[in-house]
Image (tube, rainbow, N blue to C red):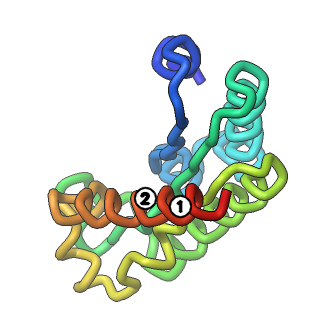
């Protein structure tokens, strides 16, 4: 929210791409106060409202998040993540919130979670540290985004 006006709205882009980081989810997994799905939903709603108000007619694409890999993330970041199935469930909750808001605002969803490998070891091949993608992961994200962009342009 703090950078939205400067980094997006003032530039008057042809399209806007919203990629949400995982800090909100990590705060929830670490039981930080006020880090709740409702707070996340409010943040996304505020971002979407600003985009809709200030960039009317600009296509907005939002990318779902891939789930962090507890098995590997703890090596670099410490042992703050609970078991993988709990992590997965929380990421699913947050991606579902994003998906519902995208439908409500009639924006476009880049369904990265459905394309990303569910298997921890397969997913690890696309990760730098269990949380952030490596070059291969970013290449795959760009490919999925480009596919969504093309199919959107073809259908509109």
Q: Residue at the location (18% across, 58% down)?
A: 134
Given contact means CB atoms under 8 Å apart, are the residues at marks 1 and 2 in contact? yes
The C terminus: image quadrant = bottom right
Q: Nearer the viewer, residue 114 or 70?
A: 114
Q: In the image, 59: left or right of 72?
A: right
127 in relation to 45, above or below: below
Is residue 94 something one can see in this rendering? Answer: yes
Is residue 74 something one can see in this rendering? Answer: no
Q: Residue at the location (28% across, 77% down)?
A: 123
Q: In the image, 118: left or right of 61?
A: left
Q: Residue at the location (46% across, 19% down)?
A: 7
Dot 1 or dot 2: first in sequence order is 1
Position of residue 72 measured from the top left corner of the image (x, y, whole percent): 22, 69
Q: Residue at the location (72% across, 33% down)?
A: 57
Position of residue 125 measured from the top left corner of the image (x, y, whole percent): 17, 75
Numbered badge on residue 145: 2
Position of residue 1 measured from the top left corner of the image (x, y, whole percent): 60, 24
Q: Can you identify the residue that label 1 sits on?
A: 110
Q: Nearer the viewer, residue 73 or 149?
A: 149
């Amino acid at each position: 929210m703090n950078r939205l006006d400067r980094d997006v709205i003032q530039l008057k882009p042809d399209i806007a791409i919203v990629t949400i980081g995982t800090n909100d989810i990590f705060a929830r997994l670490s039981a930080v106060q006020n880090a709740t799905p409702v707070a996340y939903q409010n943040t996304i709603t505020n971002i979407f409202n600003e985009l809709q108000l200030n960039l009317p007619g600009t296509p907005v694409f939002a990318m779902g998040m891939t789930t962090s890999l507890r098995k590997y993330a703890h090596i670099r970041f410490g042992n703050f993540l609970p078991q993988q199935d709990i992590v997965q469930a929380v990421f699913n909750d947050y991606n579902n919130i994003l998906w519902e808001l995208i439908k409500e605002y009639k924006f476009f969803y880049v369904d990265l979670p459905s394309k990303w490998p569910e298997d921890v070891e397969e997913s690890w091949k696309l990760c730098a540290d269990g949380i952030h993608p490596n070059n291969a992961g970013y290449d795959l994200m760009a490919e999925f985004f480009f596919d969504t962009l093309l199919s959107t342009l073809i259908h509109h």
